[in-house]
Image (cartoon, grey):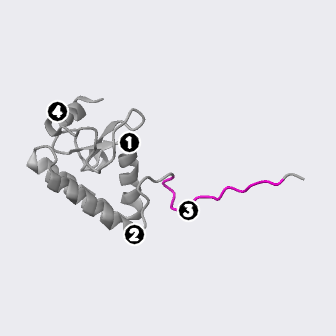
Amino acid sequence: MNTVLCQLIRIYEPRNIDWMGYKITKSNPYTYHHIVERRYGGKLTIENGAILSRKAHDHLNYLEVYVPEAYDDWQRFFRYINAKGTPLTKEDYEIIKLITYYETKYKVRRTPRKLEGYKQKKKVKKRWK
């Protein structure tokens, strides 16, 4: 884990839930999200970071491509949390619920299996004669 992510965890005390409401587990660890992407000059700093789990990070990348309005809502929320500089409150968790609800209006799956799109192939049962 990089030192900036460790500092974010010490400051914001996420208690095993990331900034998008995903649970942190051994199979879904913390990751550092650049609010301003590196390719656009974003630096590895506390002010430019968000605490996300691996699944949340994948989900956010999916939103960036397929539902940019929802992606922008999350980015605004991350900036708001960084400006506060304190651990998430009950009100912040309510905002997370609202943004998540907004995503459902666009039929976005909470944990995308593939970044290519929504439809998954159906399993076909083979019949043996």
Residue kind at label 3, given as amino acid type:
Lys
Element type at mark 1: helix
Comparing 1 with 18, the one in front is 18
Sequence order check: which comes first, mark 3 or mark 1? 1
Please say if the residues under marks 3 and 4 sit with CB atoms less than 8 Å apart: no
Task: Give the residue at mark 1.
Answer: 54
List x then y, in percent, for residue 88: 16, 47
The part of the chain drawn in magenta is 114-127
Disc 2 target residue? 106
Q: Reading the chain from its start, which is encountered first: label 1 or label 2?
A: 1
Report the amino acid beneath label 4: Arg
Quadrant of residue 26 within the rendered picture: top left
Disc 4 vs disc 1: Cβ atoms closer than 8 Å?
no
Name the side, left or right, on which 129 lies relative to 76: right
What secondary structure predominates along the stretch shown in magenta? loop
Q: Which residue is mark 4?
A: 10
Residue hosting label 3: 119
How far apart are the alpha carbons under marks 4 and 1? Answer: 19 Å
- Mark 2: amino acid: Tyr
Q: Which one is nearer the viewer's eye here, 107 or 31? A: 107
Residue 124 appears in the rendering: yes
- Helix, strand or loop for disc 2: loop
Q: Is residue 72 visible?
A: no
Task: State which quarter of the image contains the N terminus.
Answer: top left
Name the residue: 65% across, 59% down: 122
Q: Residues within 10 Å of mark 2 (few under 14, many from 20)?
A: few
CA gap, disc 3 and disc 4? 39 Å
